[in-house]
Amino acid sequence: MAILLTNDDGIDAPGIRALTDALSDIDTVYVVAPHVERSGCSHSVLIGRTFGLTDRGNNRYALESTPADCVRAALSGLITGDTIDLVVSGINRGLNAGYDVHYSGTVAAVREALIEGVSGIAFSLDNYLPTAVFDEAARIARSIVVRMRGENAVDAPFCLNVNIPDVPLDRVSGVRVTTLAHRTYEDSLSAVSVDGPRRIVEFRGEIPDGDRSIDTDFGAVKAGYVSVTPLSLRYAAPAAGIAAVFNDLIFRGVS
């Protein structure tokens, strides 16, 4: 068995280097990560197109595509000498809490693993600065990986989204299993430059706030806890209210 590492910050990002160092003594570690940063790419994959793959040595591969494609490539024939039983993504620079999971390439990587029947854990650190240090977060990640692969590990494939507070280890309040928080995004579209009918625009906004209830991922991290949120591939919501709308809808003569 072996561990696959990936991320959306790129193969040279400090978060994935810290993870590699922290997990390499547990089992064989393979790294398949985007050759450049792909933050916010969600679950994007390349269909019917080619992409470059560079062998960086020491079981490390840089793929010119998305985190989800990195997992697809690793599980579809790139890694042949071992069986990958766990995909670990991150450590992301900045939270992936609440609705962020729908945008995040970090989280999409472990969601792709679950689609393939392989367990996955995504790790993110509550620090968005380029100077973020990941060593202590990597120690937390290592503890969680060891626990999830231990004697009492979950039998069925699982998908976890883990957010880590940016505090010293002795100030971490503990670990909480949480739900996704409601997040409030206040982006605005601004023109950067204008060239005739064509405009260069960008989204501007602050890092979104969120529900700070202690049982949510955002609230738990802000209270100093490591947040562990189990994720599912089942997006369907309760249908009772929607079903009532269509109860008496009948199509006649439609072929």
Image (cartoon, helix red, strand yellow):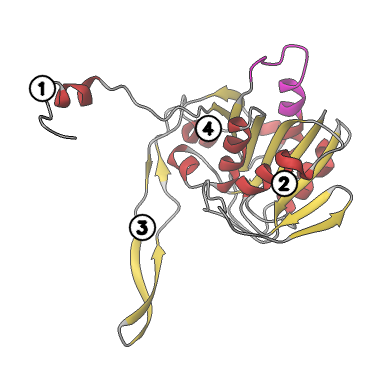
Which circle's residue, 3 or 4, is located before the other in the chain?
Answer: 3
Marks 2 and 3 in Cβ contact (< 8 Å): no
- Tell me the residue that label 1 is attached to: 248
Which circle's residue, 2 or 3, is located before the other in the chain?
Answer: 2
Residue extending farthest to the top is: 152
Front residue (pair 213, 117): 117
- Name the front one of labels 3 and 1: 1
Which circle's residue, 1 or 2, is located before the other in the chain?
Answer: 2
Label 4 Cα crowd, 10 Å radius (few <14 / some 14-19 / many 20+): some
Rendered location of residue 35, percent (x, y): 70, 60
Label 2 Cα crowd, 10 Å radius (few <14 / some 14-19 / many 20+): many
The quarter of the rendered structure image containing the C terminus is top left
Rendered location of residue 119, percent (x, y): 66, 28
- Tell me the residue that label 3 is attached to: 187
Front residue (pair 119, 124): 119
- Name the front one of labels 4 and 2: 2
Tag 3 secondary structure: loop
In the displayed structure, would residue 124 be above or below residue 66?
A: above
Marks 4 and 2 in Cβ contact (< 8 Å): no
The quarter of the rendered structure image containing the N terminus is top right
- Residue at 65% x, 40% y is 167
Q: Label 4, label 1: how many angstroms apart (C-alpha)?
A: 49 Å
- Tell me the residue that label 2 is attached to: 134
Tag 2 secondary structure: loop
Give the label on residue 223, or none: 4
| Left or right: residue 45 compared with residue 85 | left
| Left or right: residue 107 compared with residue 88 | left
Label 1 Cα crowd, 10 Å radius (few <14 / some 14-19 / many 20+): few
Marks 3 and 4 in Cβ contact (< 8 Å): no
Q: Label 4, label 2: how many angstroms apart (C-alpha)?
A: 19 Å
Q: Is residue 226 visible?
A: no
Give the label on residue 93, or none: none
